[in-house]
């Protein structure tokens, strides 16, 4: 077997290589063949690369795009959640105001505040009356 291992993308001699057989699901064999064609290297070379990557700890568990997509989705989810919480708080405030209008407490509060203002500014009553009910000069 005096074939140099450069055919295999390795620097060792072919004598350093061993032939092994493993049972693999048909799906995996099909994927390996597709990857081999796409990458332009032999299935054996892909298997060697996979073993090297696995044993060196350089395995990528997810493609970078998927990791980035998950991060974006997580960010969007947190923003949507925060927005929904603000909407819930605003709706609660609106409901409280509606209850105050319905039971008359808001009207009573406005009347009390208006009377207190007029009591504190007695000279302003005439100007307001003229504003809303102007006198006609004959």
Image (tube, rainbow, N blue to C red):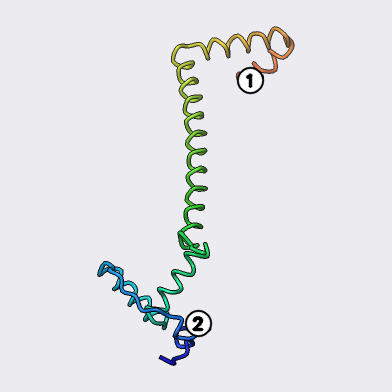
Mark 1 touches mark 2? (CB < 8 Å): no
Query: Residue 20, relative to residue 81: is it above or below?
Result: below
Q: Which is more toward the observer, 115 or 60?
A: 60
Whether residue 88 sits left or right of residue 110 in the image: it is left
The quadrant of the picture occupied by the C terminus is: top right
**Residue furthest out toward the top:** 119
Q: Which is more toward the observer, 96 or 121?
A: 96
- Mark 1 Cα within 10 Å, few/some/many (few <14, many 20+)? few
Between marks 1 and 2 in the image, the one whose residue lies nearer the viewer: 2
Secondary structure type for disc 1: loop
Image point (42%, 78%), residue name: 45
The disc at residue 18 is none
The image position of residue 133, as x and y in percent, is: 60, 18
The image position of residue 60, as x and y in percent, is: 48, 62
Query: Residue 3, relative to residue 60: is it above or below?
Result: below
- Distance Cα–Cα, label 1 vs label 2: 102 Å
Q: Which is more toward the observer, 26 or 132?
A: 26
Q: Identify the residue under disc 1.
A: 134
The image position of residue 34, as x and y in percent, is: 34, 76
Secondary structure type for disc 2: loop
**Residue furthest out toward the bottom:** 2
The image position of residue 120, as x and y in percent, is: 73, 9
Image point (58%, 14%), residue name: 110
The quadrant of the picture occupied by the N terminus is: bottom left
Q: Identify the residue under disc 2.
A: 10
Q: Residue 114 appears in which quarter of the rendering?
A: top right
Q: Residue 42 appears in which quarter of the rendering?
A: bottom left
Image point (51%, 83%), residue name: 12
């Amino acid at each position: 077997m005096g074939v140099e291992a450069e055919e295999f993308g390795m620097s060792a001699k072919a004598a350093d290589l061993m032939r092994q057989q493993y049972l693999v699901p048909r799906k995996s064999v099909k994927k390996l063949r597709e990857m081999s064609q796409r990458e332009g290297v032999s299935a054996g070379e892909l298997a060697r690369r996979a073993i090297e990557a696995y044993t060196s700890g350089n395995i990528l568990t997810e493609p970078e795009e998927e990791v980035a997509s998950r991060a974006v989705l997580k960010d969007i989810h947190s923003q949507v959640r925060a927005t929904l919480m603000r909407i819930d708080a605003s709706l609660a405030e609106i409901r409280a105001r509606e209850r105050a209008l319905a039971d008359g407490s808001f009207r009573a509060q406005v009347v009390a505040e208006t009377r207190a203002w007029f009591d504190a500014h007695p000279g302003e009553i005439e100007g307001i009356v003229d504003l809303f009910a102007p006198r006609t000069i004959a």
